[in-house]
Image: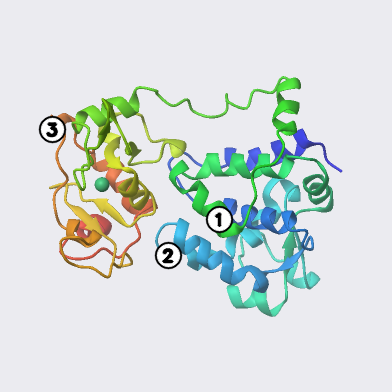
Amino acid sequence: MKSAIEVLDAFENIRRAQRAGIYAPHKPLLILLALSRVQRGEQRLVSFAAVDQQLKQLLAEFGPSSAAKSRHYPFWHLATDGRGALWELTGPREFLKRAAGHTPGLTELRKHEVKGGFPLDVDEALRHQPGLLQAVASRLLDAYFPSTLHADIVASLGLDLDGPGEVREARLLAGIDTSTSRRRRDPGFRERVLRAYEYRCCVCGFDLRIGLTPAGLEAAHIQWHHVGGPDIEPNGLSLCALHHKLFDLGAFTVEPSEHRLVFSQLAISGSRGMGGELQFHGRTILPPQHPDLLPAPEFLAWNVTNVFKKPARRPSALTALAAR
Ligand SMILES: [Zn+2]
């Protein structure tokens, strides 16, 4: 059985392989799904067919457009990460011997009844070391997803993260600082972004205060912080808690020329009148105090590519952006 530190480090190496600015939630979502199975005491290996629908749904909800089409990639490729330290595949020997770069199709994986799961030493450590599974899951969530989405992802998977904290303590005792590998957040970012937009949601104008303190108002990163988005005003939007969440789910984005709000065709709302969410589609954002503080095109382009759920509702300038 591997030690807690060894298991944590093996998962950490996946994160390091992620290229700056490139966001792909496939691997972390598959691993989180596999962790939830371990937590429920299910068998170590599972056939691709058995998890296919759940993976599809997770990627459709928490991934960028068309992510669900490549949902089988990590099931196959995770086995070659760290020379098989984290994922094991079983199936017909000839089929498994094909070149690593040659990804089989969805139907092939189902037809050959390929099974995957954590290797035995990792699986045992996750099942028997208190708090380890929760620590791995928490770190994956922190590394790949904005905090607005953590609770929803955990709920979709049925994961229970309120475990004991022995592992974190073990790391501290071992002198391993977990914070150095992460980029520090600038504590002034929220205040500067909120001030730029005069303490209101730039979508709906929400500006409630409790006493003197703005309530339910957040500074959203347009390019997510954990994938290299800087803590500067042109990468920020002042949003109410609801619009922050919808923005991080890709329900809407902002087009770069006139800063109009563009909603996804996948965002459906029953009420189309003044009270409905889609009333904001096509409107310009409530502008910041100074044009220098406006969202910058490069961050908006990142958001369209990596978060926004295409296709966009019309009319919009997004088609021109996507065609570039
Ligand atoms: Zn709002």
Looking at the rendered structure, the secondary structure element under dot 3 is helix
Mark 3 or 1 closer to N-term? 1
- State the residue position of label 1: 155
**Where residue 165 sits in the image (x, y, percent)?**
70, 33
Which is closer to the viewer, label 3 or label 2? 3
Q: Marks 1 and 3: in contact by CB < 8 Å?
A: no
Residue at image point 79% right, 47% down: 122
CA gap, disc 1 to disc 2? 22 Å
- State the residue position of label 3: 291
Please tell me the numbered disc located at residue 250: none
- Neighbours of disc 1 within 10 Å: few (<14), some (14-19), many (20+): few
Give the position of the N terminus as an image quadrant: top right
Q: Amino acid at mark 2?
A: Ser
Q: Is residue 133 left or right of residue 254?
A: right
Q: Is residue 187 left or right of residue 53?
A: left
Give the position of the C terminus as an image quadrant: bottom left
Looking at the rendered structure, the secondary structure element under dot 2 is loop
**Where residue 314 sits in the image (x, y, percent)?**
18, 65
Residue at image point 49% right, 65% down: 68
Q: Amino acid at mark 3?
A: Pro
Mark 1 residue's CB less than 8 Å from ligand 1: no
Q: Quadrant of residue 97?
A: bottom right
Mark 1 or 2 closer to N-term? 2
Please tell me the numbered disc located at residue 66: 2
Which is closer to the viewer, label 3 or label 1? 1
* In the image, farthest residue toward the front: 211
Q: Marks 2 and 3: in contact by CB < 8 Å?
A: no
CA gap, disc 3 to disc 2? 34 Å
Which is closer to the viewer, label 1 or label 2? 1
Mark 3 or 2 closer to N-term? 2
Q: Amino acid at mark 1?
A: Ala
